Each structure stands twice: as structure tokens, then as C-alpha cells.
Image (spheres, helix red, strand yellow):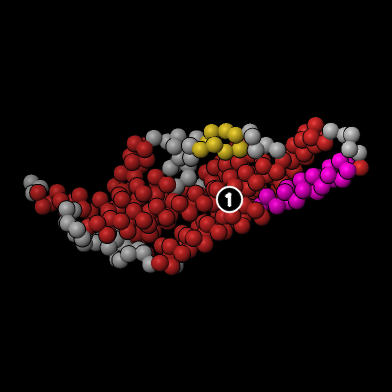
Amino acid sequence: MMTEQDIAQFVQQYFLPFARIASMLMVVPVIGSRVISPRVRLAMAMLLTLIAVPLLPAFNAPPMLSFNMIPILLREVAVGTLMGFCFQVVFHVFVLSGQFIAMKMGLGFAMMNDPTNGVQTTVVSQFFLILTTLMFVAFNAHLYLISMLIQSFQTLPIGSGMLNTDKLYMLVQLGAWMFASALSFALPVLTSLLVINMAFGVMSRAAPQLNIFAIGFPFTLICGLALIWLGLGNYLEAFEKNLDVGFNFVHELIEAP
């Protein structure tokens, strides 16, 4: 017959791993999107916890209702959140590049509700986000990320100390990389549209009687769509490159060999 102490020890054994796993599943793309109910994510976290805990190294957790539990719990939540958030940054590289392209080609007014994040985005960003999500699932990146989450319990054991500031600074650098990568991905389209707009500026000076707004907007829109279509050939390469950056960040975060 289980005593009260045995029940408390059983709960402690599963609670802290559950905090790290649930934190990542709440933030990570695809699984953590708003279209998936939080109850489903919590159920997935409980299932992963039940599977993972017997494989984890033994750890000594403080009592559940003690003040010593608070910093350990915050650390577990921070590790899981950072692991999921870094891939949100990878996804938003393409969302941000879609914003740049849409604003330049005149589609900034065509906004759609993004069901993943619950915000308004341009149609180009939504198109890029759908492509990125499909590739993320097709490459089984979500399964690899879950395996790295389980591995993190070996490299960052529960109760081994707080995260150092270097890892938080890495997250800031990842944000700077997001803006640079988004601009780099959208730069060919932006440069081509800039040349087209300069050509229309010369035409407006050479023939002032022409209605440049009536002619330029549909022409810029058609050219922008054609440039996006031509650039899709490099989309897979850009996605793989950015995905590698996300996984390298997670490797450094969990100090994986």
C-alpha cells in the first residue's frame, strides 16, 4: 500500500520533467499553434513525460511545496520555452521576408488572419508560413526536436543550476540573425522591384501625361508574383540552412556533444 510520502515522491519524479516538456510543446511551431487546443498539447506532454521519465537519470527533487522548488521549476520552464522559441524565430524569418516583399510589391493591404499566431499577416507571409510548416513536418524536424528535448535531460540534468547569461545572449543574437536572414532572403525580389520602380520614375518624368499609378501598380504586382515564383527554386535551400541554424542553437543551449 502506497503511503503519502510515496505518492509525493512519485509526483515529484514526474512534475519537473513535465514542466520542461510542456513548456516546449506550448511554444514550438506546428504543435504549439493556436489551432491545436491547449488540452491536446497538455495530453501530449503528459504522454511524453510518462514515456521519458523511466529513461532519465535519477535526480533528487526538493519537496513540492518548498521555496527550493521555485528556482528549479523556473529553470525547467525556461529550458523548454527557449528550445521551442528558437524555432519560432526560424519560422518568422520567412514570415518577415514575406512582409518585406508584400509591402514592396503593393500587397501590404491584403492581410489575412494567421491562425498559428492569432495576428494579421500579409498573404505572401501566410503563403511562406504554409510552405515552411509543410517542410518542417515533411523533414520530421518535429520528431528530431522531441528527441533533442529528451536528450536535454542527460546534458542538462534537473536541478543542475540556473542557465547562464551567455545562453540568454545567444537568444538575442538569434533575433538579430532573424532580421538579417529575412532581408537576405527577400533581397533579390526587393532589388528587382526597386529597379522597376526607378524605371517608372524615369517614365513619369519623360511622359508626364501617363498615369503611372494606374499602370505601375498592376505591373509591379505581376512582376512581384513572377519573382516569387522564380525564387521558390531556392526556398528549400534557404529552409534547410535556417533549420540548421535553429538546431545548432538548440545543441548549444542543451550543451549536446
The residue located at (28%, 55%) in the rendering is: 73
- In this view, which residue lies farthest toward the right? 206
Q: Nearer the viewer, residue 205 or 229?
A: 205
The stretch drawn in magenta includes residue 190: yes
Range covered by the magenta-colored residues? 185-205
Magenta segment main secondary structure = helix
Q: SS of the residue at dot 1?
A: helix
The amino acid type, in three-letter code, at marker 1 is Val
For residue 176, above or below residue 45:
below
The residue located at (30%, 66%) in the rendering is: 161
Q: Nearer the viewer, residue 176 or 81?
A: 176
Q: Nearer the viewer, residue 221 or 14?
A: 221
User: Is residue 237 at all visible to an observer of this figure?
Assistant: no
For residue 193, above or below residue 222:
below
The residue located at (63%, 33%) in the rendering is: 110
Please give left or right for residue 160 compared with residue 180 in the image: left
Please give left or right for residue 222 compared with residue 107 in the image: right
Q: Which residue is mark 1?
A: 93
Please give left or right for residue 20 compared with residue 202 in the image: left
User: Is residue 41 at all visible to an observer of this figure?
Assistant: yes
| Quarter of the image where one finds residue 70 | bottom left
